[in-house]
Image (cartoon, rainbow, N blue to C red):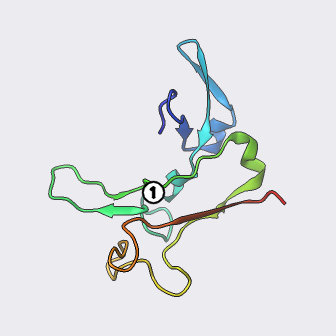
């Protein structure tokens, strides 16, 4: 996701405003990945879009497999507050009582919703 020869998706607008960088003589354009701001406990929403507990030495528990990638040209049309990890379908919770995705009644991934203001 962050590799220059992959999506080259960075976590800050300020960095992505440079639009591209040169790596070993080749130019690579940036994407902005606003999902970084939703990872962890920085917002009052789940800490990711997918939860998986395993009995292994290294377990992240929360993962952010679901992404939004934006080119710098779209910055004027995107406000970070218009990107949400949904925890409800409007009527029913998508979470269990422990705050993880409700696999029995929904999915193992929480949906994301974002808006570009291109009116």
For the residue pair 102 and 55, the one nearer the viewer reads as: 102
Which residue is rendered at x = 16% and y = 50% of the image?
57
Q: Which structural element holds mark 1? A: loop
**Which quadrant of the figure has residue 106?**
bottom left
Q: Position of residue 24 (x, y in %)?
A: 53, 13
Seen at 43% across and 53% down, the residue is 65
- Return the x and y of residue 78 as percentages of the image width and height: 71, 55
Count up the numbered dots: 1
Residue 29 place in picture, x, y as percent: 63, 30
* Residue 102 left/right relative to 33: left
Occupied quadrant, residue 19:
top right
**Quarter of the figure with the C terminus:** bottom right
Residue lying at the far top in this picture: please name it: 25
Residue that sits furthest to the bottom in the current view: 91
Horizontal placement of 101 versus 24: left or right?
left
At a point 52% along the width and 71% down the height, the residue shown is 86
Left or right: residue 40 versus residue 15 is left
Q: Residue 107: image x %, image y %?
A: 39, 70
Farthest residue to the right: give it.
119
Q: Eyeballing the image, is 96 above or below 33?
A: below
Q: Residues within 10 Å of mark 1 (few under 14, many from 20)?
A: some
Residue under pointer 1 = 39
């Amino acid at each position: 996701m962050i590799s220059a020869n992959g999506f080259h998706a960075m976590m800050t607008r300020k960095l992505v405003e440079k639009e591209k960088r040169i790596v070993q003589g080749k130019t690579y354009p940036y994407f902005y990945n606003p999902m970084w701001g939703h990872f962890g406990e920085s917002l009052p929403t789940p800490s990711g879009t997918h939860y998986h507990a395993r009995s292994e030495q290294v377990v992240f528990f929360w993962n952010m497999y679901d992404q939004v990638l934006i080119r710098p040209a779209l910055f004027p049309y995107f406000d970070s507050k218009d990107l949400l990890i949904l925890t409800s379908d409007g009527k029913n919770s998508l979470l269990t009582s422990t705050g993880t995705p409700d696999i029995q009644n929904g999915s193992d991934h929480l949906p994301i919703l974002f808006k570009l203001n291109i009116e």
